[in-house]
Image: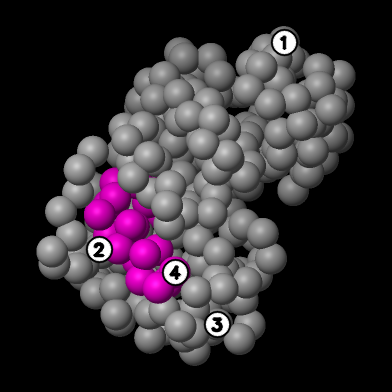
Amino acid sequence: MSVHRDRQPTGFVADTISFSSVDGPGNRFVVFLQGCNFDCLACHNPQTIPGHGPVAGFHPQHTAVEELLHSIRRAAPFVSGITVSGGEATQQPEFLHALFAAVKADRDLGHLSCFVDSNGSCDLRVWDDLMPVMDGAMIDLKCLDPQIHQRTTGMDNGPVLASIRHLQDLGLLYEVRLLLIAGVNDETGLLQRTGEWLADVDQSMRVKIIGFRAHGARKSSLPLIEPSRDALNAAAETLRSVAPFDICVV
Ligand code: SF4
């Protein structure tokens, strides 16, 4: 994909936080972009999905790269990098590239790592284009089973699986995240197949197992149930029985 960068694009930004310890390696400044191509039943940020606003007190802004750099400079002494999340970060690829390139080129910020937190559903050329300025990506695999994926996100998981493989080939896959919802995508056979698929990409992949939390999630037509801690640990064991993944459970 060829992107013209004569002008610095602005980003449609839902929010930023100056300090997070759960959005990639170390402590990070996080930018949440507005807009998402998924419509997940378990979404905790439904205000970022088109058609789910307006929400009181929520005001996404068109924001220039330089404006964000100003905020990042203030946070820089306390963080090791920035993460762009969403919504879906890759829906604004030109802005993503411009922001990362500006961070890398900045005398005071060039040491910060640049990560993307993504649902992985994008054209693979987005990753190729980001490669020179991006240090890694966390990808959510909502479900390996295409029907369950379609039912819970409204979208096909083919592009997600392709992104995981492609990022691994590029050396940019930092972590795959599995959000488990009790009775929806946590069946042992499915997890076993998921482990086999992931192991085919990388046997030592970093995998984060996240239990669905009802608090803060959108209202859903399906009753979504939180998995127990034991169920999450059992899921980790199922994956470990397949390959020596680097697994954390949260
Ligand atoms: S990909 Fe993330 S932001 Fe988009 S709908 Fe799903 S949970 Fe919400």
Question: How far apart are labels 2 and 3 at the CA level?
Answer: 22 Å
Residue drawn at (36%, 32%), measured in percent from left and top?
124
Report the amino acid beneath label 1: Gly
Identify the secondary structure beneath mark 3: helix
Of the pair 228 and 95, the residue shown nearer to us = 95
* Mark 3 crowd level (few <14, some 14–19, many ≥20, 10 Å Cα): many
Question: How far apart are labels 4 and 2 at the CA level?
Answer: 21 Å
Identify the disc placed on residue 12. Answer: 2
Q: Mark 1 near ligand 1 (CB under 8 Å)?
A: no
Identify the disc placed on residue 189. Answer: 1
Reading the image, the residue beneath label 3 is 76
Residue drawn at (79%, 38%), measured in percent from left and top?
246
Identify the secondary structure beneath mark 1: helix
Report the amino acid beneath label 2: Phe
Query: Going from the N terminus, do you reach mark 4 or mark 1 first?
Result: 4
In magenta, the rendered stretch is 85-105
Q: Picture quarter containing residue 173?
A: top right
Looking at the image, residue 209 sits to the left or right of residue 171; the answer is right
* Mark 4 crowd level (few <14, some 14–19, many ≥20, 10 Å Cα): some
Question: How far apart are labels 1 and 2 at the CA level?
Answer: 40 Å
Of labels 1 and 2, the one closer to you: 2
Question: How far apart are labels 3 and 1 at the CA level?
Answer: 44 Å
Of labels 2 and 3, the one closer to you: 3
Reading the image, the residue beneath label 4 is 104
Question: How far apart are labels 4 and 1 at the CA level?
Answer: 43 Å
Q: Picture quarter containing residue 189?
A: top right
Looking at the image, residue 205 sits to the left or right of residue 152; the answer is right
Proximity of marks 4 and 3: CB atoms separated by less than 8 Å: no
Query: Going from the N terminus, do you reach mark 2 or mark 3 first?
Result: 2
x and y percent of residue 75 in the render? 53, 84
Proximity of marks 1 and 2: CB atoms separated by less than 8 Å: no
Of the pair 67 and 50, the residue shown nearer to us = 67
